[in-house]
Image: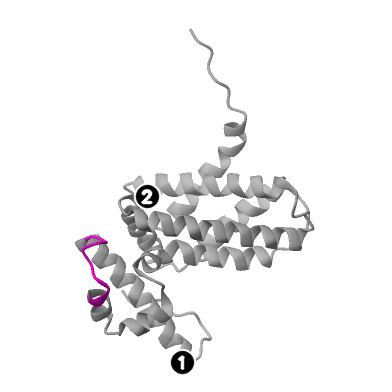
Amino acid sequence: MNPVIPDGLPLRERKKHRTREALIATALERFTAQGFDGTTLDELCAGVEVSKRTFFRYFAGKEDVALAPTQDMWTAFMAELAARPADGGLLRDLLQDTVLTTIRAMPAEGWAHRVRLSRVLAQDTPSMNARNLQFCDRTTRAALDIVCERFGFDPADLRPRLTFDVVLAAFRCGLEEWTRHPGPATRDTLAGHVRDAFAAIPGSIAVEIPSAA
């Protein structure tokens, strides 16, 4: 599968983008076929015909290349969030719309399939989950900095943090449901599952415990 190269990139950047995408695709294919621990970095680099030195220009380790599809989405989310106009309304709605807009803007060819491969791998790979938690913590803090600066919230106000945490938890629920779903791995199907999870937020916060019979 040939990677989609963004329009307007200089030749040097196009080559770098192509190499990075090849590393991600090859890594996920080999990790899926041979297991995460069963695939060495030497094998991965040989599959793309690059040196380990080149690999480390793009990724800090095997966990990072395996998590790249979702991490790329959240990087794009940050850029989209920073560009959002301060038009008022609910912060929850803005965050949810930014997530869905970001998903729909990801590459149509191959990206969603790689997200699913990555999530399946993570279920049985503790080191991937640990690295993902670190990334989520950094992303949350950076997103809150953007929200406070862009929309005038006090950094000491707990509400933006709680709002972002709720939206992130709903995204994870939608992602998990989509990963288990036997249907096609596309941006639209992922967005649909995430949208359903977002729609469940108001009712989940007010859910009541059934009375004992």
Q: Residue at 62%, 58% (x, y): give it.
A: 141
Amino acid type at mark 1: Leu
Question: Which secondary structure class fits the magenta region best?
Answer: loop
Q: Position of residue 202 (x, y in %)?
A: 62, 36
Which residues are drawn in magenta?
35-42
Q: Quadrant of residue 128?
A: bottom left
Q: What's the distance in space between the residues labelled 2 and 1, CA to CA?
A: 35 Å
Residue 185: tell me if it is visible. Answer: no
Please, what secondary structure does the residue beneath circle 1 have? helix
What secondary structure is marked by label 2? helix
> What's the mark number on residue 179?
2
Q: Image quadrant for the N terminus? A: bottom left
Residue drawn at x 48%, y 67% as measured from the top left: 72
Mark 2, other Cα within 10 Å: few <14 / some 14–19 / many ≥20: many
Image-based side of 38 in relation to 22, left or right: left
Count of labels in the image = 2
Q: Which residue is mark 1?
A: 11
